[in-house]
Amino acid sequence: MSSDHASIEAPPSIAPIPLDRRSLSALDVGVLWNDLSLGLLVLLTGGFLAYGLSVPGLVGAILVGTLLGCLPLAAFALAGAREGVPSMVLFRPALGRAGSVLPSLLNVAQLLGWTAVEFWAMALLADALASDLVGIDVPSVWLAVVAAGCTILALGGPVLVVKRFLERFGTWIVLGSGVLLTFAILTGEPDPAHGVLTPAVAPIPFWLAVDLVIVMPVSWLPLIADSTRFARAERGTFAATLVGYGLGNAWFYVLGALIVRELAVSTNDLEGLAGTIGTLTGGAILLVGLLIGEAPNAFANVYSAAVSALNVRPGSSQRALTIATGAIAFLLALAVTIERYEVFLFLIGSVFVPLAGVFLADYFVLARGRYGPVQMFGASAESVRWRTLVPWVAGFIVYHWSVPTGPTGWIAAVRTAFTSFGLPFPLLDSRFGASLPSFGVAFALALLVLRRRPRS
């Protein structure tokens, strides 16, 4: 046995899942990721696409963005099923064990943000229902209830949620609500109380709309292997993820844009969106369905935040980390506002789109689609692979450079500083948005700077 093989030490919390514990079929995977693509926040994000595009252009941007975002998502799902480890452990061969701490911490940060928004949105829906039905307005109580409920689901794990929650009743309620919502939107009338609505955001060009669609499936990239590691076999996992998530994502993005276009709802007002849905035919049923549909999203965020933290501190208790995640997100949800939601989405894209390019180049090309435990847990995985930061950082810069008014505007600030001194500062051609250039640069550079490694 080589010294590298002899030094393998995989902590039980993040070790490959034994075959006898992998119980999710391809259908189970498809059900889970279809459900995670359906929710109130997807409708809200779709609303940002309502202005500046014709209906055919809008649908085209959603279909293109869904395909471009779901292909790498499905590839990550396949890698998780093949290797049997969490998403953050998959980054170890490319970044090194210590290097994988950085995306782990970034993922925990974004998941705390997502969880807080999910808790806040669910509490808003529950409070709206309670106010209409029984006249009780206690949003903080509902926030505590949904936080506790979703944390309990996270303690149960993906197999329990899929087999006992989604497949027994959850996913059927959500799909039924989606069908009813589609009918209600197509047959509804604008609310006269809204009057002539001024767009809350500037009209959006085609490829920037594509970026906003891509970012939703991309935000799940650092999570998806946390569930697909429980797949019984890798066969069918790619297709189940691509079809399951893709269909739901495209469907609810279109519905979100149509709500804004056809029913005159503000694009940045989640409370107004929920209120309008409540006035549609079967509004109370729709709100209940959306509330149930949002719970698995919050579960996945809480669960994966704890699993990502285990890659940083493998000896920690997953149960304790899960409870801590739910508690912190609950406190953050008390102060949630939605004004910077679009910026939050772009920032997620700028971090994880190029990281996806690096991983896919390393795993599917350089490692030929297989890492194995030696590369993830052996001695060679311990040090930081500094060269991997080159394509990742380059892709991050290209993302911001392509759309300088997007995530943070820091490139625009640099350009202003240059031009104030009469110095030229050319911007990249943004006709293809930010995601494609960022991914392409990171993928290509990863192939150049990373070494091909023998298969374990």
Image (tube, rainbow, N blue to C red):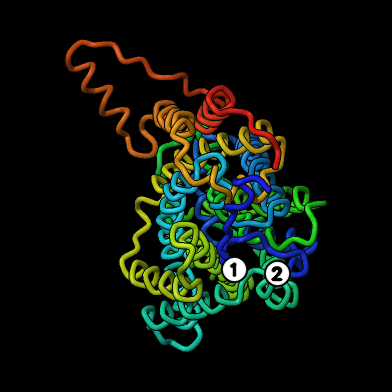
Q: Position of residue 198 (x, y in %)?
A: 39, 45
Q: Secondary structure at mark 1?
A: helix
Looking at the rendered image, the disc whose residue lies closer to the viewer, 2 or 1, is 1
Mark 2 and mark 1 lie on one chain; the one further toward the N terminus is: 2
Label 2 sits on residue: 171
Tell me: residue 407, above or below residue 302. above
The disc labelled 2 sits on which kind of residue? Thr
Q: Position of residue 297 (x, y in %)?
A: 56, 64
Q: Is residue 423 visible?
A: yes
Tell me: residue 397, above or below residue 72. above
Residue nearest the viewer, comparing 301 with 56:
301
Residue nearest the viewer, comparing 258 with 18:
18
Q: Is residue 382 left or right of residue 221?
A: left
**Going 46% across and 64% down the picture, which residue do you hit?**
115
- The crowd level at tag 2 (other Cα within 10 Å; few <14, some 14-19, many 20+) is many
Tell me: residue 405, above or below residue 72. above
Q: Are marks 2 and 1 in contact (CB under 8 Å)?
A: no
Label 1 sits on residue: 296
**Going 77% across and 69% down the picture, which residue do you hit?**
20
